[in-house]
Image: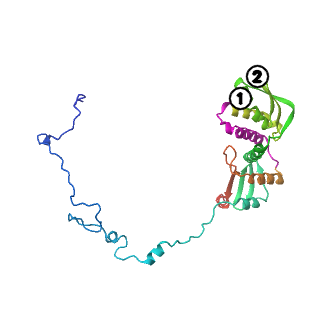
């Protein structure tokens, strides 16, 4: 068979109905229907009322309502308080008094629920970020003069962005001089170690030049760059008192579970998980 593309777009009428006359549709309705008539009674048209006994008796079935039923309807049974699964930070921090182990980027400390693992780099980033932000709100960050100024070659776009944010960078502790093709840094925030200066400058310039940051978020991004550079280049000693101080400062942060960049800091391994390993 061949396809007929010139076929008329009409209704396909069965062959047996082609010669039959057209019949006009008939609309049927109930002339005795009354929307204002009670539904508990039969309609005037003689149609049988198929409602249940409960509906005809307004929801009480064959029994009439009583006062006691309404009193018990409003009675509320008190349920016992469900046990809370949230770990109390004060209890956990009090239990983190035992021997601690620093292995690479991770700090292991015993706690009531098992073993707590802390990402030390992210913890240091969170601690410094909160400290700088709290100080920055009320006053500029203290800076320290460099014995030998640091120079950083920049493009014209980077120089322009640095110049536009000079006042903000000064409040963060940076003192600089912008030249034709480079920036000369003469002072940095006091919290920044010397070995973290280059890393911090690269992060700062990248944030203010190549990322689309809202004006209200520039300060937070710059503080995050400073704290991240500090954390990458600063590792606490494995002395127990130093590690305990890090834990205490971390738990004092309002958002201690995640770093400023949104990465997880703390993970707890329960005793059941440890038992399954043996």
Residue 47: image location, x then y, percent: 22, 64
- Quadrant (top left/top right/bottom left/bottom right) for the N terminus: top left
Identity of the residue drawn at 72% across and 39% down: 219
Can residue 199 be seen here? The reply is: no
Question: Predominant secondary structure in magenta?
Answer: helix
| Secondary element at tag 2 | loop
Residue 211 is inside the magenta segment = yes
Q: Identify which residue is drawn at 84% across, 30% down.
A: 149
- Taking the view exactly as shown, the residue that stands out farthest to the right is 147
Q: Percent position (x, y) of residue 100?
A: 78, 55
> In which quadrant of the rendered view does residue 54 lie?
bottom left
Label 1 neighbourhood size at 10 Å, few (<14), some (14-19), many (20+)?
some
Which comes sooner in the sequence, label 2 or label 1? 1
* Mark 2 closeness class: few <14, some 14–19, many ≥20 residues within 10 Å: few
Check if residue 27 falls in the magenta segment: no
Q: Name the residue beneath numbered marker 1.
A: 161
- Asked whether, in this view, residue 75 is left or right of residue 266, the answer is left
Q: Which residues are magenta?
A: 209-237
Q: Is 47 drawn above or below residue 126 in the view shown?
A: below
| Residue 47 left/right relative to 105 | left
Q: Which mark is residue 181?
A: 2
Residue drawn at (26%, 61%), measured in percent from left and top?
34
């Amino acid at each position: 068979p061949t396809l007929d593309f010139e076929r008329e777009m009409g209704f396909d009428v069965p062959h047996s109905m082609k010669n039959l006359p057209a019949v006009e549709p008939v609309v049927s309705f109930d002339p005795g229907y009354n929307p204002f008539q009670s539904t508990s009674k039969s309609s005037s048209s003689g149609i049988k009322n198929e409602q249940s006994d409960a509906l005809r008796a307004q929801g009480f079935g064959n029994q009439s309502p009583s006062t006691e039923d309404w009193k018990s309807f409003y009675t509320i049974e008190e349920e016992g308080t469900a046990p809370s699964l949230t770990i109390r930070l004060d209890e956990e921090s009090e239990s983190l008094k035992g021997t601690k182990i620093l292995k690479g980027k991770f700090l292991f400390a015993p706690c009531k629920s098992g073993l707590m693992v802390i990402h030390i780099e992210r913890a240091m980033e969170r601690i410094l970020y909160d400290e700088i932000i709290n100080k920055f709100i009320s006053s500029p960050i203290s800076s320290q003069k460099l014995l030998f100024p640091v120079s950083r070659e920049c493009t014209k776009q980077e120089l322009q962005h640095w110049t536009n944010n000079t006042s903000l960078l000064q409040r963060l502790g940076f003192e600089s001089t912008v030249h034709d093709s480079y920036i000369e840094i003469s002072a940095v925030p006091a919290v920044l170690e010397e070995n973290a200066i280059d890393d911090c400058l690269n992060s700062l310039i990248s944030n203010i030049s190549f990322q689309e940051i809202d004006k209200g978020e520039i300060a937070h991004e710059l503080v995050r760059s400073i704290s991240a550079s500090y954390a990458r280049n600063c590792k606490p000693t494995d002395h127990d008192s130093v590690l305990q101080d890090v834990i205490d400062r971390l738990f004092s942060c309002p958002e201690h579970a995640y770093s400023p960049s949104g990465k997880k800091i703390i993970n707890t391994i329960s005793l059941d998980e440890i038992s399954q390993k043996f």
